[in-house]
Image (cartoon, rainbow, N blue to C red):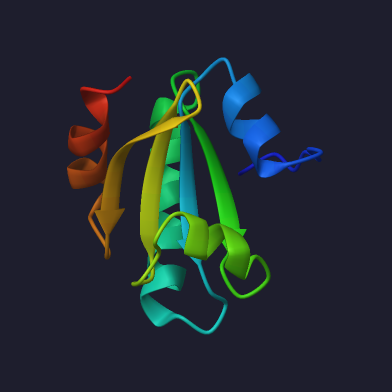
Amino acid sequence: MATKKQFASFDEMINESDLPVLVDFYATWCGPCQMMAKILEQVNVLLRNQLRIVKIDSDKYPELATQYGIRALPTLVLFKQGKPVERIEGVLRAEQLIQRLRSFL
């Protein structure tokens, strides 16, 4: 289960994290996003000490979605040291997602 934590800004969150941050841009009405939520729970259990997972509702934060060029949902963006290093659109199985992320962790 994800931990809820408040940050002054999105930039603060991704820049001050000691671990890479995987941001899930989603919407509550998006069916594939709901499927991805369960997959991210599995990934979180397996990679909890190597990665932080953050969910951003693109309907509530459209400026962030625009800033990072989010055109499809779900879109995952992996940030390392505050910079986007990987982008994944659509639903992947947990094993596929972990394999894509491993080289960045």
Q: Residue at x 41, y 81 (%)?
A: 31
Q: Position of residue 99 (x, y in %)?
A: 18, 34
Q: Residue at x 49, y 64 (%)?
A: 66
87 up-or-down from 66: above or below:
above
Q: Nearer the viewer, residue 32 or 75?
A: 75
Would residue 52 be found to the left or right of residue 83 on screen? right
Q: Nearer the viewer, residue 49 or 12?
A: 12
Q: Position of residue 85 (x, y in %)?
A: 31, 33
2 up-or-down from 63: above or below:
above
Would residue 37 be found to the left or right of residue 10 on screen? left
Quarter of the view holding residue 42: top left
> How many dots with numbers?
0
Which residue is farthest top?
18
Q: Residue at x 68, y 71 (%)?
A: 60
Which residue is farthest bottom?
29
Q: Position of residue 8 (x, y in %)?
A: 81, 39
Q: Nearer the viewer, residue 37 or 8?
A: 8
Q: Position of residue 27 (x, y in %)?
A: 53, 74
Q: Nearer the viewer, residue 69 or 38?
A: 69
Would residue 33 be found to the left or right of residue 8 on screen? left
Task: Name the quarter where the N terminus is drawn.
Answer: top right
